[in-house]
């Protein structure tokens, strides 16, 4: 009996590219007789006619499930929505723009067969814009520092995991999901495989600077208390520095009573320490706000419609 592979594709402004991605998945899986496959398409409230395209695709395919979110919740929330509809032993997540080569999914599956719990595609030459490449580097640094990601592990949006990893991720029901953090929380048996990366032929990336900043902030507050620890150490350092500077000022005045205490240095110290206090209060407030939202049972996503839902 063949093993079932579930493909999850978060969709946003992909009406013109989605058909090609699905055709490539079908062609690739036809060459691997030991696997069957299903596809879950999650429309993240795209402003174009993406869901109409998904509806047309689902009309002729019972092995494709279409999920329409009520508003834009972001890529990671769309993945979490898709995880609820998978039936396969292996789950592969990829982009909707055709830049991630679906015809090389066999490389990811082979790594899972060889014993890995999760496998991420690694690109030798990424065809993203300089802005997206910078965002990827920041995301990698954040995952390494905040989440304990191994330094030599490359992270990307094209990855595959075994079913038990998906089941473990679904135990996370709080708002602000961060899939990378959930995978790292579940296992350290993660590998990379080299795949190609294509240039985008149609459209542009849906990630803006605002969305990237929100993603980074979500990443280092959702699964780590290191920002709070950094605030503690920075506060302690500032307090010691302020005490030493005050002691130095007093001694200098006692040694030379004619020394004029500078107004500029005083204002600089007030502005510096005041800024640090406000920054730390902001970080603490972010954690408290997330606790409040979690207690209110805010959803990760809201589904407006589902097509071809399988039992």
Image (cartoon, rainbow, N blue to C red):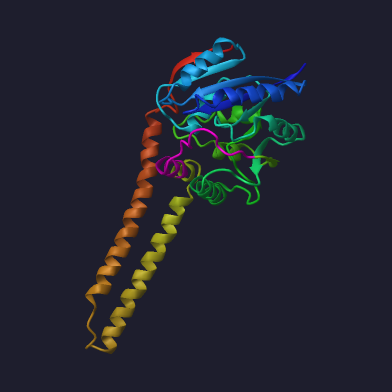
- For the image, the number of numbered tags is 0
- Please provide percent x and percent y for residue 18: 55, 25
Give me the residue at 75% from left, 18% from top.
2
Give me the residue at 72% from left, 33% from top.
112
- Asked which quadrant contains residue 171, the reply is top right
Q: Which residues are magenta?
A: 197-216
- In this rendering, would 299 be left or right of 128? left
Give me the residue at 66% from left, 36% from top.
118
On whether residue 211 falls in the magenta region, the answer is yes
Q: Which quarter of the figure is the C terminus placed in?
A: top right
Up-down relation of residue 292 to residue 279 (above or below):
above
- In this rendering, would 8 be left or right of 28? left
Up-down relation of residue 84 to residue 248 (above or below):
above
Up-down relation of residue 70 to residue 282 (above or below):
above
The answer to whether residue 252 is seen in the rendering is yes
- Please provide percent x and percent y for residue 227: 45, 51
């Amino acid at each position: 009996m063949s093993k079932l592979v579930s493909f999850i594709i978060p969709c946003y402004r992909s009406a013109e590219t989605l058909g090609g991605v699905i055709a490539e998945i079908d062609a690739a899986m036809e060459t691997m007789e030991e696997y069957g496959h299903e596809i879950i398409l999650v429309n993240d409230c795209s402003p174009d006619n993406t869901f109409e395209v998904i509806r047309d695709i689902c009309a002729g395919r019972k092995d494709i499930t279409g999920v329409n979110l009520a508003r834009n919740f972001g890529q990671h929330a769309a993945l979490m929505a898709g995880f609820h509809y998978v039936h396969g032993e292996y789950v592969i997540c990829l982009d909707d723009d055709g830049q991630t080569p679906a015809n090389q999914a066999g490389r990811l599956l082979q790594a899972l067969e060889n014993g890995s719990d999760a496998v991420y595609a690694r690109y030798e030459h990424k065809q993203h814009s300089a802005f997206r490449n910078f965002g990827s580097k920041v995301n990698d640094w954040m995952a390494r520092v905040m989440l304990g990601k191994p330094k030599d592990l490359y992270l990307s949006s094209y990855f595959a995991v075994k079913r038990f990893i998906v089941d473990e991720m679904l135990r996370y029901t709080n708002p602000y999901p961060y899939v990378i953090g959930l995978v790292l929380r579940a296992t350290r048996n993660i590998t990379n495989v080299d795949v190609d990366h294509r240039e985008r032929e149609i459209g542009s990336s849906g990630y803006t600077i605002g969305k990237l900043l929100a993603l980074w902030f979500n990443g280092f507050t959702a699964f780590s208390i290191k920002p709070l620890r950094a605030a503690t150490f920075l506060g302690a350092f500032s307090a010691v520095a302020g005490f030493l500077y005050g002691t130095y000022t007093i001694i200098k005045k006692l040694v030379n009573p004619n020394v004029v205490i500078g107004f500029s240095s005083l204002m600089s110290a007030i502005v510096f320490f005041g800024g640090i206090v406000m920054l730390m209060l902001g970080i603490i407030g972010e954690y408290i706000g997330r606790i409040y939202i979690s207690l209110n049972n805010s959803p990760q996503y809201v589904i407006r419609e589902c097509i071809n839902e399988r039992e």
